[in-house]
Amino acid sequence: MNVQEELKRFPLFDRVKHDHDISVYIEEQNKSLYSMGFTEHSFAHIGVVADRTAYILDTLGEDDHTIDLALTAAWMHDLGNIINRVDHSQSGAMMTFYLLDKMGVPSEDIAPVIRAIGNHDEGSGVPVSSIAAALIIADKSDVRRSRVQYDDASKYDIHDRVNYSVKSSKLKINQEHTAIKLKLEIDTRYGEIGEYFEIFLERMLLCRKAANFLNMDFHLIINEQTLM
């Protein structure tokens, strides 16, 4: 099945993915984060998040309509960064409400999307639905070398070092659907495993809560060592 045929299964996501205004906001919010020294939050990131969100829900047997809404939430989840990084999940939910309402999307479809977006970030996020839970895991598991936006290593902070150290990142649900595993291969010449926990522990604990909501355990495996 080619990409266009696949998108026909998900009509709202197809509209959102090709919407000019939404694409502009995605590009502009990443420019703001770049200027503040954050890792990449543009189309590569939301593409990974969308793929992983759909993978989780499809594997667990959710219907196409639910996956369509989840893909929409994944594509729009970081829009709030254009306003401010602080509370971006809540401001992003409000932006998403406005944009989808303007597109004529029914409230029954807008509600689960903005509920998930408003609850995707650590600190204030809670897995309040299967869509929110899948979005949390997909978003927090996206750590990889290509998210580092600076070419000059002298500008790297701990987030850059940790992301740059990740050579491989795989998310996998076991055959019994009882556990979801984030398996990382880290080059410790660039970042230590301890640094990963220093900045990502809160995110991994939220992933555990999200997995529990989906009736699964969450496991973090780094360099073949199970750490959670």
Image (spheres, grey):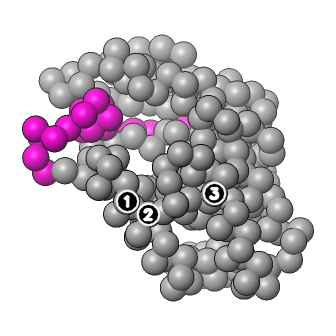
For the point 45% across and 44% down, the residue is 142
Residue 212: where, in percent of width, then height? 74, 28
Q: Is residue 111 something that shows in the picture?
A: yes
Give the Cα separation between the discs numbered 3 and 1. 15 Å
> Label 2, on which residue?
29
Q: Is residue 50 visible?
A: no
Q: Measure the C-alpha gap from mark 2 to mark 3.
A: 12 Å
Q: Residues within 10 Å of mark 2 (few under 14, many from 20)?
A: many
Q: Amino acid at mark 1?
A: Ser
Q: How many marks?
A: 3
Determine contact: label 1, label 2, CB under 8 Å: yes
Return the residue at label 1: 32
User: The disc labelled 3 sits on which kind of residue?
Assistant: Ser
Indicate the amino acid at tag 2: Gln
Q: Is residue 226 left or right of residue 149?
A: right
Q: Please report contact status of discs 3 and 1: CB closer than 8 Å, yes or no.
A: no
Q: Secondary structure at mark 1?
A: helix
Seen from the viewer's position, the closer of residues 153 and 138 is 153
Where does the image place residue 103, in percent across and percent down from the top left? 72, 85
Report the span colored magenta: 151-173
Front residue of 192 and 31? 31
Name the foreground residue: 169 vs 103: 103
Residue bearing the label numbered 3: 91
Q: Is residue 184 magenta?
A: no
In the image, taking residue 166 as reference, residue 113 lies left or right, namely right
